[in-house]
Image (spheres, rainbow, N blue to C red):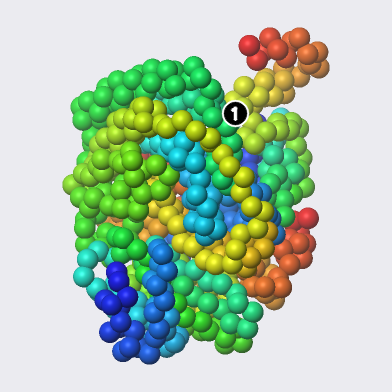
Amino acid sequence: MQYSTEGMMPFGPVHPSLKEPEYFKLYLEGEKIVHVEPRIGYVHRGIERAAQERTWIKNIYLFERICGICSFHHSIAYTEGVEVLAPFEIPKRAKYLRELVAELERIHSHLLWLGLLGHWAGFDTLFMWIWKDREHVLDLEEAISGNRVNKSYTTLGGVRNDIPDGLADKIRTEMAYIEKRVEYYKSLVQSEETLVVRTKGRGRINQDIARKLCPVGPLLRCTGIARDVRAEDPYSSYGDVPPQVQTSNDGDIASLMTLRLNELTDSCRMVKETLEKMPAGPYRVNFPRSVPAGEASFHVEAPRGELFYFVKSAGGSTPERVKVRTSTLANILTATEMLKGHALADVPVVLTGMDPCFGCMDRISVVDVDKSKEWTVGGESLRRYGIEYYRRK
Amino acid sequence: MSSEELAPLASRLGGTIAAGPRTTVLSVPPDRVVEACIGVSSLPGWYHLSTITGMDLGQDIAILYHFWQGKRFVQVRTQVPKAAPRLRSISGDVAAGVIYEAEIQDVLGVAFEGNPFLGKRLILPDAYPPDAPPPLQKGTDPHKIKKMMELE
Amino acid sequence: MLLVTGVANPMMRERLRTVYEQMPEPRHVVAIGACALGGGVMKDCYSAGSGIDSIVPVDLYIPGCPPRPEAIIYGILKLVTGIPDPVPDGEAIVK
């Protein structure tokens, strides 16, 4: 069905409160969204092409900067993909260390998301509390690798350094702290009316939509489908320390909240278990400069879902082709489905609910089909509009 | 997904199967690609289309459809000549393919007939010069592109 | 005060310029991070800019990939207070 583009409301791509620029065209009939068209590319940089001219090791620094939040997962998807291609076996201790930092990254990412959801729903106190707790995790990541994001911790052949001696105890203490806080947030999101009203029944998807559109990560698991790359296709040390795959059943934003909170608890468990079971030994071995010719497909479970890398070597010291498919790109179609049928006031919360990472993927425009009116809405205005709308109800 | 399970599909479509350690590749001629994808996605069990990759091989452009079957990757593979880069879109039957095809349209210049993004850009900037070759084709110089877009 | 992170790719370029022109005076632009400074690791990517100072005038550069939160706070404080910084003061602010 063709919609007239006259009643257009461009939202984004730059606004004081939009975290990353993107552009969705929303077609409204009355109050309800009937059709959504994405136009991404606001952070398209040309990384896949640049990768062809960098050596295998230098590409790690490039790929981990695709996204600051799941940066480590990009680097392990790339390094383990190349290690499969070579093929090259890394020391066991390195695998455990990778899993440790990957789960820490999942914890910080889910906390970030929950805080943002609170912010968009008008619950800024939650945002502040959660982001303060998140600082504990970022401090751990910095103690291990030297940087809070873009850690460059993994490398071809293992990881760059071992964890310092006293740090294991600190990690355990912080995990206990995070677990306690997560239990508190679990009770909060069930009882806090601001959140419940804005998230229950919102953005509802079901298994049929999931089957058709192939979303990944929590967006898939909130419909009750228990699929997680860490369990299905274990990488690093996930074969020895597997996740307990969490699901929730209602397919709405409230389900996503519960699901991610449960994943947080599970990640804390995995961090502690990885520390316990970590074998002694080297953390890194030398990796050859060139990789034999061949192709490999590889995926990891980033915080937002399956992150897929395809690597091809022509036998040289630079890759011939690296293809990256990020989790948010896989979820765009499902996100557009989630938005349909909702009022404009729900857009910030539903869109945040899919945990978009546009740096990973690559603004919202609204078309009023009936009135053929065109107006611009800023991200902050839309957030406030959403809060006022529900306050009035 | 074993080679045996794929064999009937392969012979029906005039394709070949190559089984690697993690991936089974089903190569088919370009006009049978839609049927191959429908075939793979209807095999028993849950299918997941991870992505579609395009690669410039020189004279041809290879298109790889990566399906994840729960234990292995099944890759449907075809190639089209660079001089006539056209394929039918799978998005009518495998809806998840629409975004991945749109990306290949932008970066490699392959046209997927039936894809709603054909003629529109998904990820390339509007300022990308219309007479410049697509960025991921061999021989496209990123520095020249940057100069044309006044980024240097 | 406009804080800009990341490379400005062609899609963002006009938007950045527009947002800058919409700001009332006095206005300042802070470039945060290696990409905003000069393209960073993305410098040779075909759709990445080479620093935002070719698009808008920049008053303050904060390097880092990413810059630490303390560095960002320190830089912005310096811009706002406007006094030249002998090193001892800088350390006091950071602490």
Asked if one can make out residue A365 in the rendered structure from this viewpoint, the answer is no
Which quadrant is the N terminus of chain A positioned in? bottom left
Q: Relative to the observer, which residue lies in front, A206 or A262? A: A262
Q: Position of residue B150 (x, y in %)?
A: 76, 59
Instruction: Please report the residue visible at 64 percent of the width from the left and 73 percent of the height from the top.
Output: B137
Q: Relative to the observer, which residue lies in front, C23 or C54? A: C54
Q: Residues within 10 Å of mark 1 (few under 14, many from 20)?
A: some
Give the left or right position of residue A289, taking residue B52 as reference. right
Instruction: Please report the residue visible at 29 percent of the width from the left and 60 percent of the height from the top.
Output: B70
Give the left or right position of residue A340, taking residue A158 as reference. left
Instruction: Please report the residue visible at 43 percent of the width from the left and 37 percent of the height from the top.
Output: A96
Give the left or right position of residue A186, taking residue A100 as reference. left
Give the mark count.
1
Judging by the rendered image, the residue that carries numbered circle 1 is A146
Q: Find the residue positioned furthest to the front.
A: A281
Which quadrant is the C terminus of chain A positioned in? top left
Instruction: Please report the residue visible at 66 percent of the width from the left and 24 percent of the height from the top.
Output: C71
Say which amino acid is labelled 1: Gly
Is residue A237 placed above or below A179 in the rendered structure? below
Asked if one can make out residue A173 in the rendered structure from this viewpoint, the answer is yes
Is residue A78 placed above or below A125 in the rendered structure? below
Q: Position of residue C15 (x, y in %)?
A: 62, 50
